[in-house]
Amino acid sequence: MQVLDRIDGFRKELDTARADGKAVGLVLTMGYLHDGHTSLIRRSAEECDLTAVTVFVNPLQFGANEDLDRYPRDVERDVAIAADAGAEIVFAPPVEEMYPTGPVLTSIHVADVSEGMEGAVRPGHFDGVATVVAKLFAIAGPCRAYFGEKDYQQLAVVRRMAADLSFPVDIVGCPIVREDDGLAMSSRNVFLSPEQRRAASVLYRALQAGATDLGRARQAMADTVAEEPLVQLDYAEVVETDNEYRLVIAARVGTTRLIDNLGVAK
Ligand code: AMP
C-alpha cells in the first residue's frame, strides 16, 4: 500500500500502472471509511488491476453553516481499511495541495440535474462536488470510477459532467450498503446519539412505505417520517427514469443531515 499526498506523485503512479497495461480503478471519498466505501473498493479491486482511493474532505462542497470542521477524519484508519478491501494506493492530499492558490476561481456547474433536492437545500454544493471530481479525474487520468447510489443526485451530476466534458472515465454506480435496520451507511452516522441512531431508521421505513404506495409515494414517505419526532423531513421526492421510479429522501436528525433513496423497477 502506498500513501501519497502530492498530485504529481499520484499522477505518476497511475501513469506508470497504465503504461504497464494495468486497468486503473478509482474510488473518491471524504474518508472515515465504512462498509459502503469498502463495497466500492472491493468492486474496483475485482474489476481493475490497480485500485486507488482518494481521501479528501473537499471544502468547496460545504456551505458556510455546514459540518466541514467537525466532519470525522482518521486517515491512518482509512489506509488500513482501504488496504484490507484491496486498494493499492491511498491519495490523501492536504487542502493546500489541492487548492494552493487560495480561492478557487474555476467552478463547474452542471445545470438541470444539480437543481432541486440536495441542490435546493445546499446551494453551491454540487458545483463544489463537480469541481473537485473534475480535478481528481484530471489528476487520475483514464480509469473506471466507482460511485455509490447512496448519493443518487451526485451520481447523476458526475455522470453528466464526465459525459459533457469527455473525461476518459467510466462511471460505475454501486448499490447502497445498509445497517441491519436499513439505515444507509454514512460517515455522518457517528454524530448520532443512541436515541437518534434508533430514530434514523425511519428514513428506510419511509422509502419502503413509498415503494408500496407509489401512487402517493411522497405523502406516504412524509407521513412515515412524521411518526418519528426526532427526525425532521427536508424533502421526499420521486424521480422517474426510463426503467424505474427512484424514491429520494433527506431529513435532519438533530444537527445531522441524512439522505437515502430506493429504486422501484417499472
Ligand atoms: P463520501 O465519503 O460520503 O463522500 O462517499 C464516497 C463514495 O462512497 C460516494 O460515491 C458515495 O456515494 C459512496 N458511499 C457512501 N456511503 C455509501 C453506502 N452506504 N453505500 C454505497 N456507497 C456509499
Image (tube, rainbow, N blue to C red):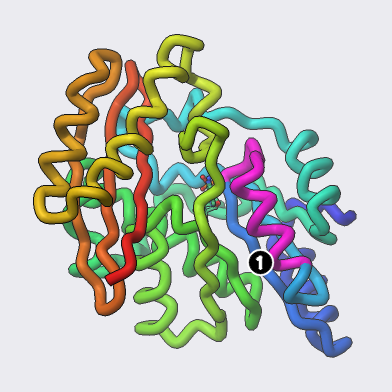
- 11 up-or-down from 119: above or below: below
Q: Residues within 10 Å of mark 1 (few under 14, many from 20)?
A: many
Q: Quadrant of residue 179?
A: top right
**SS state under label 1:** strand
**Residue 146 shown left or right of residue 9 in the figure:** left
Q: Position of residue 224 (x, y in %)?
A: 22, 30
Q: Which residues are magenta?
A: 30-45
**Residue drawn at point x = 38 percent, y = 54 percent:** 128
**Residue drawn at point x = 11 percent, y = 55 percent:** 215
Farthest-out residue, front: 212
Asked if the stretch drawn in magenta spans residue 41, the answer is: yes
**Residue 156 shown left or right of residue 214 in the figure:** right
Which residue is the site of mark 1? 26
Q: Quadrant of residue 139?
A: bottom right
- 165 up-or-down from 210: above or below: below
**Residue 260 shown left or right of residue 35 in the figure:** left
**Residue drawn at point x = 70 percent, y = 58 percent:** 41
User: How many marks on residues?
Assistant: 1
Q: Quadrant of residue 11?
A: bottom right
Q: Position of residue 64 (x, y in %)?
A: 31, 32
What is the magenta segment's predominant secondary structure?
A: helix
- 12 up-or-down from 177: above or below: below
- Report the amino acid beneath label 1: Leu
Q: Position of residue 214 (x, y in %)?
A: 18, 54
Most foreground residue, 219 or 200: 219
Asked if the stretch drawn in magenta spans residue 142, the answer is: no
Q: Position of residue 150 (x, y in %)?
A: 45, 51
Cβ(mark 1) to ligand 1 < 8 Å?
A: no
**Residue drawn at point x = 50 percent, y = 11 percent:** 194
The quarter of the rendered structure image containing the C terminus is: bottom left
- 75 up-or-down from 37: above or below: above
The quarter of the rendered structure image containing the N terminus is: bottom right
